[in-house]
Image (spheres, rainbow, N blue to C red):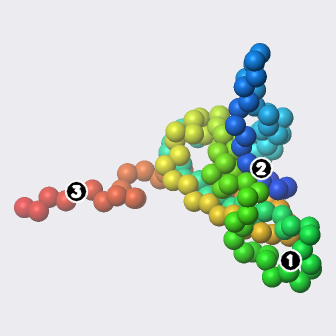
Amino acid sequence: MIEIMLLGAPIPAARPRVTRFRTYNPKQKTMTRIKREIKYFYGALPIEDPVAIYLRFFMPLPKSLSKAKKLEMASTPCTTRNGDIDNIIKMYTDCMNGIVYKDDSQIYSVDSIKVYSFEPRVEIGIVVYPGKGICYEEKRSNK
């Protein structure tokens, strides 16, 4: 398993903005920073085989809460609207595109969670598909 840990609060992907003159991605600078971090931690050629991705998003606790309430909320599911999990997944799978794997169409499985934490971060696990016969049994002939 390949493991990558990125420090800082998880960031959701933004929709492209369209103006009268151009189309642009408002989070392009953020994506470039995340890609640079992923490239630094991964440091190998892109994988060409199918991959399973495991994403763990540790969201920051709200600053307005008391210390006791923060202790109570740590490691609990984060269901507030500070980034939908599908948008956060999209940001990180797009950033790994061309660095960890050649194309995000190679992803055959995604497992993710989003919980509160005192240390906001993103943990990424990548498992390369090991080959034939692991997930599905071959058809057996009964003669």
The quadrant of the rendering that contains the N terminus is bottom right
Residue 118, relative to residue 55: is it above or below? below
Q: Amino acid at mark 1?
A: Lys
Mark 3 or mark 1, which is nearer to you? Answer: 1
Q: Position of residue 27 (x, y in %)?
A: 79, 37
Q: Quick one: SS at disc 1? A: helix
- The residue tagged 3 is 139
Q: Quick one: SS at disc 2? A: loop
Which of the numbered marks, if any, corresponds to residue 70? 1
Q: Position of residue 139 (x, y in %)?
A: 22, 56
Q: Nearer the viewer, residue 77 or 6?
A: 77
Within-10-Å neighbours for mark 1: few <14, some 14–19, many 20+: some
Residue plotted at (72% across, 75% down): 76
Q: Which numbered disc flags the more N-terminal residue, 2 or 3?
A: 2
Furthest residue toward left: 143
Residue plotted at (85% across, 55% down): 8
Q: Quadrant of residue 97?
A: top right
Q: Amino acid at mark 3?
A: Lys
- The residue tagged 2 is 11
Q: Quadrant of residue 57?
A: bottom right
Q: Nearer the viewer, residue 114 or 141?
A: 114
Mark 2 or mark 3, which is nearer to you? Answer: 2
